[in-house]
Image: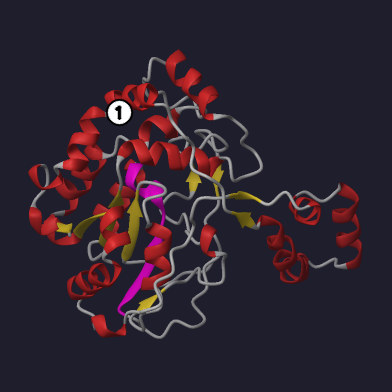
Amino acid sequence: MQSISNVPNLLLIGGPKCGTTSLLTWMRKHPEIYHPWEKMPISASESGFLLGGISDIPFSPTKPKGTLLMPNEINMVKYRQEKWIIDKSPQHLYSKKALDTVRELLPNAKIIITIRDPFDLLISWHGEMNKGLNYDTSFNQLLEKLDDKNWVIDDEDEATWSFLTYPQYSNFIRSWIEMLGEDRVRVIKLSTIAKKPVQVLESISKWLGIDPKKMPQDLVVKNVRGRLSNNPLRRLLRKPPDFIFTMARIILPSRALRKMILDPIRRLGWKHVSSSKDIIPPELENKIRDKFSDDIEFFKNLEEYIPNSIIID
């Protein structure tokens, strides 16, 4: 069992599709911030170390409650005693297990929470799920499922739980602030990250006590809207026939060797291409916004619900 003395002490959390991936990409380039999962594809670069074990909630339609979550392999080879070890995972925000662990065992950890308009979050999260292989539900089909549930959150129903929970983040944010205190939490809107990325990184640097001038300037947005490429070769790489795996085990008997040689090749199958945003009829948008009205109000008037000192704007 591998162990490290300085556990991740800078947690980048927030609603899914709220800018955590782009922030991580930029922040991990600072010489005082180390990212132990740097070698992983940026779209999958979260560790899950706080959520490892049997999941207490259904994080997505493909991960029901009770799923065994295995934290990704950590890499401390290049660690040079940087001040901050960063980890990102949108699911941390919604997990009582994660909050309890930070409160009880990580007294020096700081938390960055990113949020966006709840309606946009729902639309974008549905699109993100459809970028994968194991989810194929249209938006209208999803709404039918939500109507069947009367828009009530049920943690035994992985098909609807995340779509109802992730946009309704206000109480989770309040819990993190209440449990950890104002000095350890910062909240940022996605719109602020998009419009003022340099200023956001400067504010974060000052809060963390590191040199803002050493933050990167090439701020390319990551994990944008898209869908998996339908190129036949890429489809084959995503889901090869069983005999390919059999041959690979014969030719490359070492699992470590298979991972080293084949994983980079298979990753080429997960090429995403741009796609248009779903067009939602006004009456349907109004219905959804009415269901999420409390959290939309929280988002629009954030400074009325949490201390101004916590908001990066």
In the image: residue 115, left or right of residue 297: right
Query: Does the stretch in magenta take in 235?
Result: no
Residue 62 image position (x, y, % from top left): 57, 37
Q: Which of 171 and 232 is in front in this view?
A: 232
Image side of residue 145 versus residue 313, left or right: right
Give the image quarter of residue 304: top left
The quadrant in which the C terminus is found is bottom left
* Tag 1 secondary structure: helix
Residue at mark 1: 289
Residue 254 shows in this picture:
yes
- Closer to the camera, 297 or 98? 297
Residue 271 percent coordinates (x, y): 65, 58
**Residue at x 53% of width, y 45% of height:** 276
The question of residue 85 being in magenta is answered with yes
Q: In this view, does 5 lie above or below 135?
A: below
Is residue 203 shown left or right of residue 101?
left
Residue 139 in the image: state x and y as whole percent: 51, 29
Quarter of the image for the N terminus: give it: bottom right
> Is 209 rendered above or below residue 140?
below
Name the kind of residue labelled 1 in the image.
Answer: Arg
Q: Residues within 10 Å of mark 1 (few under 14, many from 20)?
A: some
Rendering coords of residue 95 (x, y %): 36, 42
What is the quadrant of residue 147 in the picture?
top left
Looking at this view, is 300 or 9 the one in front?
Answer: 300
Residue range highlighted in magenta:
83-94
Which residue is located at x 32 percent, y 38 percent?
A: 118
